[in-house]
Image: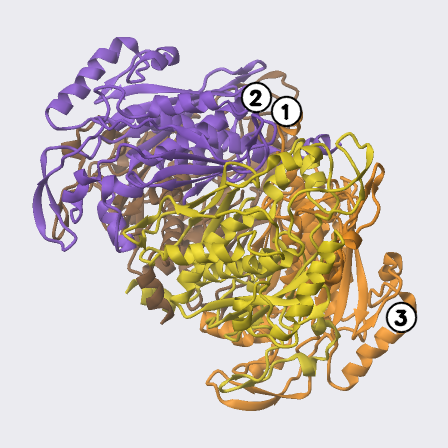
Chain colours: A orange, B yellow, C brown, D purple
Amino acid sequence: MNSFGQKLRFSTFGESHGVALGCILDGVPAGLKIDEKFIQSELDRRKPGKSEFETARKEADKVEILSGVFEGLSTGTPIAMVIYNTNQKSKDYSNIKDIFRPGHADFTYFHKYGLRDYRGGGRSSARETAARVAAGAIAKLMIKELGIEVKSGICEIDGIKSKNLNYEAAKKSIIFALDAEMEDAQKEAILNAKNEHDSVGGVSRVKISGVPVGLGQPLYYKLDGVLADAMMGINAVKAVEIGDGILSSSAKGSDNNDEIRSNGFESNHAGGILGGISNGDDIILNVHFKPTPSIFKEQHTVNTKNEELDFSLKGRHDPCVAIRGTIVCEAMAALVIADMCLLNMGSNMDGILKYYK
Amino acid sequence: MNSFGQKLRFSTFGESHGVALGCILDGVPAGLKIDEKFIQSELDRRKPGKSEFETARKEADKVEILSGVFEGLSTGTPIAMVIYNTNQKSKDYSNIKDIFRPGHADFTYFHKYGLRDYRGGGRSSARETAARVAAGAIAKLMIKELGIEVKSGICEIDGIKSKNLNYEAAKKSIIFALDAEMEDAQKEAILNAKNEHDSVGGVSRVKISGVPVGLGQPLYYKLDGVLADAMMGINAVKAVEIGDGILSSSAKGSDNNDEIRSNGFESNHAGGILGGISNGDDIILNVHFKPTPSIFKEQHTVNTKNEELDFSLKGRHDPCVAIRGTIVCEAMAALVIADMCLLNMGSNMDGILKYYK
Amino acid sequence: MNSFGQKLRFSTFGESHGVALGCILDGVPAGLKIDEKFIQSELDRRKPGKSEFETARKEADKVEILSGVFEGLSTGTPIAMVIYNTNQKSKDYSNIKDIFRPGHADFTYFHKYGLRDYRGGGRSSARETAARVAAGAIAKLMIKELGIEVKSGICEIDGIKSKNLNYEAAKKSIIFALDAEMEDAQKEAILNAKNEHDSVGGVSRVKISGVPVGLGQPLYYKLDGVLADAMMGINAVKAVEIGDGILSSSAKGSDNNDEIRSNGFESNHAGGILGGISNGDDIILNVHFKPTPSIFKEQHTVNTKNEELDFSLKGRHDPCVAIRGTIVCEAMAALVIADMCLLNMGSNMDGILKYYK
Amino acid sequence: MNSFGQKLRFSTFGESHGVALGCILDGVPAGLKIDEKFIQSELDRRKPGKSEFETARKEADKVEILSGVFEGLSTGTPIAMVIYNTNQKSKDYSNIKDIFRPGHADFTYFHKYGLRDYRGGGRSSARETAARVAAGAIAKLMIKELGIEVKSGICEIDGIKSKNLNYEAAKKSIIFALDAEMEDAQKEAILNAKNEHDSVGGVSRVKISGVPVGLGQPLYYKLDGVLADAMMGINAVKAVEIGDGILSSSAKGSDNNDEIRSNGFESNHAGGILGGISNGDDIILNVHFKPTPSIFKEQHTVNTKNEELDFSLKGRHDPCVAIRGTIVCEAMAALVIADMCLLNMGSNMDGILKYYK
């Protein structure tokens, strides 16, 4: 329900305009150095209000660790983290109390639960992803010990595609653009849409390197399946590709197969996964975000009594959710990989005997 | 690991050339009429050897129910089904005993487990999907009682796209083509590739109609996330789209939002899911299959001692896995929807009181 | 790991001397009135320092709800609750930093994790059960809507058994004694042990009434099995009996069977459960607590270097953990029953059709 | 529902008088030698009809492995096993078609599911435990590689307690009696009850030796909690004790604590578990079975229309279910321990680095 992962289990709570949001990360192995500054720095990458390309809501997103860490090390017990909400303007939402915003989860939550917390989307708000980033930061610390790294960036905005994929450039870019040459055009597209009271979509590309061969549990906890779930479950994501993705479906077998030499694969069409299991190559994902549904143009909708309305949204919103979304993709990828590393231990008797003897 | 679903839980076993394959379907509500002919007819749609567009391996794929059904009705206990393998030619595989076929899971299974059942891919073979289709047939029977139907067809082969999407046409087509006008061109592409000892990719489109509002458990057992996992976990799938999918990432918010009137949504860009929960519209998926990795062209590879080889595959293979794959997509979609219907019961106190009083 | 339940899922965090402890309760149906005063009153029943029969550590055990409740009603999203620690005296524990206290989890945690939070037992402290009581209070509110009630009391201390089982008397007793006539003798036994720097064991009896027929998922999420897990998992519990319990093993079938008449069962040897499923009668449990391992007498032990020591514990401890333990038994029973009520919805097609139509 | 375990996951199917029963055992590490003769020998210990102390139903209980084993070794994929029913006499049950047998699950299954397979108790029959024994045999093979052994025997029948606990004697005894001196008296008690158309209860004692320190996942997948669930979930079990069990509740702390020396614990009141985690000592369980509910004496009951009846059961039944039950206790204990061994891998970073480097 509100948990993710098998051996590294991650449960979140909290609403956009509630008291606080946070998570419990369960299954972190004991003895991991918990670098709190790193966790905060990851949250800072995602936090809103840093530029004109994001919502104007300013949240400190200061994370506090409540448990599971002692003298700077994880103890093997659940790590609870909490982020208090400080900059809610719930009044902004009183006008949508009884109205379903198009493209939002208002309609579905109301009908599923019979009531909803209408303030800023409540639980369905992307604000919840702050908790994912906090947990993902710890996952990153864990997999770093195994030599694994997760990077990401924006490879497309409003149909404007990156030609080069430079993850170092993305780190420095305020919109996490992978291609510095396309960055200005991408920024302009965002601002144009914003000025027109509209929004744009975008694509996040995620690269996971240093992955050992063997991660993924066939046949129903496959590495590709679980990554797809993790990414598709991020707010506004509508498509997930692995490796060549949609291009695979129009390729020939002789082009698409990655042939093998003694020093490894000759290509990486597969995106690092074969039969649901990592093959040691980089894992490559493309994650497609729809445009932010929160736009200021007038739209048709109904209220909770099913009465028709023409309605213009107000408030503070990201003009392109893909931007901050890419940080969430990284966090979810790190959580999946860390979980799979733990699950993989026990695949064969040799490994088990090595562990116990 | 080898199970899928929360309340309707589906566990499979079996290898391509083992004694038998099958599944346990747990959580089927008592009192459901189990139409064995329908289950067999679903397996017949997927079974191999029906035409030149499929592998020449002929399997009866006769399913036997071992438990959970009494006097034609489900009893609420696990339904075990078994399909014995009858047409294995394991000798075909003795030449690949120590060789990793490019594009296959041979490499990853061997390194994960330290050994592998090399006969026809063992557990990683698409043969296992017969068990999914058997279980999916029961899921279809269950959701039919709630007015829900799952349909699918092939909307693209080797880059040749369908223009019309006619699910009735797909039922009659030997390659499940959605567009009868494009069918000949799509068939020709398959046969051309086959003649050149090559293979082609394709795209399955799935449509689920009659879905009630409210299916999907936020935030980590979302309907879209779980469907993405279910589809990406099918052999050879490399991308999954929901609704407008990848097109969403280049759309504007004002185009992509589905506006609402008192009689429903004015469009269905969302593909029937908002915030991870069904909105009552048709659920639409595009599932991208890579070309069959089993091709007869010579390829580079290594053996288990990491010695380089140039190697040509033999045996019987589908030239386009998407075709039979679309039946598996249907089955997995039905299993997801049935599970979500069961999970949804308990979302609010009104429903619970109605159930218990 | 640190979670319990299937559809009503309860995850806790926190250590005895950490910043805070708490829980996420996931799966609470929307629309339940959340009576915060009731939750606090349940915590007050369990909280330490109320009398000479308990530890002298005084904790306010003030609970705060961080999420999942809006305008007094549950929203169907996770309810997070936090209790900050205020009265830690971690210095009390510096002398046991490297020492394993007999009867405690110090030894096992250290060897499992390679390090431990030695302050008051860290995560293994019974202090964590405050979070269970908070969650259990919400479960009680939920099952009350279905007419189900959980009561408990102490039926034995230091071998002194209650003759009458009066749950109203237990509510008024400072040691939750079920038999007012035996209460003084039981109290005296506790104080005698305390004066001798020793501790005593005791037995909690739990009665659940108003249970509908049909709760429990055969065959591996049985109502009796899950209750046994829930009770055995409480700190210091060493035996669990259902119905006649250990007496059943020396009974004859003709005595032990509960014969049936049109108005119900003629007896309740089964303790309300047949074949792992509730039969509508009261569910009866006996939960056996060992004496508190924290005693002030000198004991043999070793330190983390495996050097032998003779050692006397200091600090503040309950002389009889069964007393406050009985409140935890109630909470866990309520959580199990609430979970089973939710899981049971979907057992048969009639119920499902009633829900959806 | 019908599955047990986390990393070693065990799912069963089958009814007493259905086509077959069996299981899928998922998570067995690759490379384990699967000794099929041993598996069959374990089933032979449990199988019915071996003596006058058991039911007269004779079943070969011949197990077939359908998957997951290749060239004598486990492959890491699910091991499916099937046992066909051969000696059903379903006609014996036509007279109870509409009647609820006292002490049985007939009443609860009928009310939960709205219908039931009345032949021999259907799914609720102890016949299902054959599948547990088959799976348990594989678990035994796995944990044997780690030096762990599970033994058991009967320590009490009809109140007649064993004085000595000799597990070698139990292996040779037809009633698995731990004390050869008490065996005749115990046998006599069984036959006396049988002659009087009655039945007796009994107690199984389980001893697990060679257990490493550290098994068990605090706080909600504790070793003691999970063992309690596993044992309480066996048909007819009404109480479970760990270590000193119910005696703990009347002991003093100074007697009950196991003091520690450099070569280990000075006593084992705890039964090898502290804080839910194994401490390296033998794990000791007492499992209390009620008398077989199937007796031939006339009893009060009702039918499915709630009409009162006086009723005498016919058919073939065990006069003491504890006897064959002890083999099931062994199997479940082995499954729990094997699962915990797998889960434990990942508790600390040192172990993880050792595994991956």
Relative to D256, is D317 on the left or the right?
A: left
What is the secondary structure assignment of the residue under circle 2?
Answer: loop
Q: Nearer the viewer, residue B204 or A200?
A: B204
Chain designation of label 3: A
Pointers 2 and 1 within a single chain: no
Q: Nearer the viewer, residue D109 or B323?
A: B323
Q: Which mark is residue B102?
A: none
In the rendered structure, which disc, 3 or 1, sits on the residue that comes first in sequence? Answer: 3
Q: How many marks?
A: 3
> As shown in the figure, which amino acid type bears the numbered disc 2?
Glu
Mark 2 highlights which residue?
D145
Name of the residue lying farthest toward the top? D181
Relative to C353, is A61 on the left or the right?
A: right
> Would you call the spot at circle 3 few (<14 residues within 10 Å), some (14-19), or many (20 or more)?
some
Residue D248 visible in rendering: no
Pointers 3 and 2 within a single chain: no
Residue C254 percent location from the top left of the image: 14, 33
Relative to B155, is C177 on the left or the right?
A: left
> As shown in the figure, which amino acid type bears the numbered disc 3?
Met
> Would you call the spot at circle 2 few (<14 residues within 10 Å), some (14-19), or many (20 or more)?
some
> As shown in the figure, which amino acid type bears the numbered disc 1?
Leu
Q: Which mark is residue A353?
A: 1
Q: Are marks 2 and 1 in contact (CB under 8 Å)?
A: yes
Q: Which mark is residue A182?
A: 3
Tell me the residue at 42%/64% (across/down). Answer: B143
Relative to D185, is B351 on the left or the right?
A: right
Q: CA distance from mark 2 to mark 1?
A: 8 Å
